[in-house]
Image (cartoon, rainbow, N blue to C red):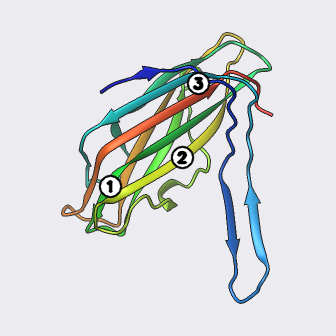
Amino acid sequence: MRITKLKHPKFIVTGAAIIGSCTLGAAALAFSITKTTSGDVEQHFITQSSATLIPATPGWHDIPNATFNITVPDSNTNHRLAHITFSGESRCENATRCSVRAVVTSAENGSTVEMEPASGTNFTFDSGGTRGARSFSRIIELSGGSEGIQYTLKLQGQIIGGTSASVFRLDDYLTQLELSNTPVN
């Protein structure tokens, strides 16, 4: 495992945009969330890893080398935007689908929330049975509170509709986390 901290100049993050449309000239439905920052990226972490198998047992399982412990500085008015991207080779076999999610746990109150867009097991990371490159990205706004707050951000995987013969294999994956140092608009 290798972890690298980098500094970057001006950075803008645009949240997920979901656009659904009906065929044959029907009206389109659109939904968009936008989060922007106007300053430097405060922290930038990257981890990379070789192959791992997600257990076929029910529930969410932590993805190895895809956990970050960060502290958002103290501030009553300044929030931070955390943006995590995960990409790698995946294979999901003998299952309805394989899902990945990003969660954040606050050391202040112990609560765990899913990063946006929060789709839970409804998000399909892989379902094809053949190896291929896959990627996803999530965001969340974090508060520093009045004395600074520690958070743990981690990625988890789960096999949906599988059996003991199911396989969810992740290989050659890279996880990137960026934490902005400016207020979120």
Q: Quadrant of the C terminus?
A: top right
| Secondary element at image label 2 | strand
Of labels 3 and 2, the one closer to you: 2
Above/below status of 50 relative to 29: above
Q: Residue at x 56, y 32 (%)?
A: 111
**CB within 8 Å, label 1 to label 2:** no
Indicate which disc, 3 or 1, sits on the residue closer to the N terminus. 1
Is residue 65 at least partly visible in the picture? no
Q: Residue at x 45, y 51 (%)?
A: 135
| Secondary element at image label 3 | loop
Residue 60: x %, y % from top left: 38, 47
Please name the amino acid that badge 2 sits on: Ser
Asked where in the image residue 150 lies, by quadrant, the reply is: top right
Is residue 57 at least partly visible in the picture? yes
Above/below status of 181 relative to 93: above
Asked where in the image residue 50 lies, by quadrant, the reply is: top left
Numbered disc total? 3
Q: Residue at x 34, y 67 (%)?
A: 161
| Secondary element at image label 1 | strand
Please name the amino acid that badge 3 sits on: Asn
Give the camera-side residue of 80 and 39.
Answer: 39
The disc at residue 109 is 3
Alpha carbon separation for disc pair 1 and 2: 16 Å
Classify residue 58 as left or right of residue 177.
Answer: left
Residue most toward the left? 165
Residue 36: x %, y % from top left: 74, 37
Of labels 3 and 1, the one closer to you: 1
Judging by the rendered image, the residue that carries numbered circle 1 is 90
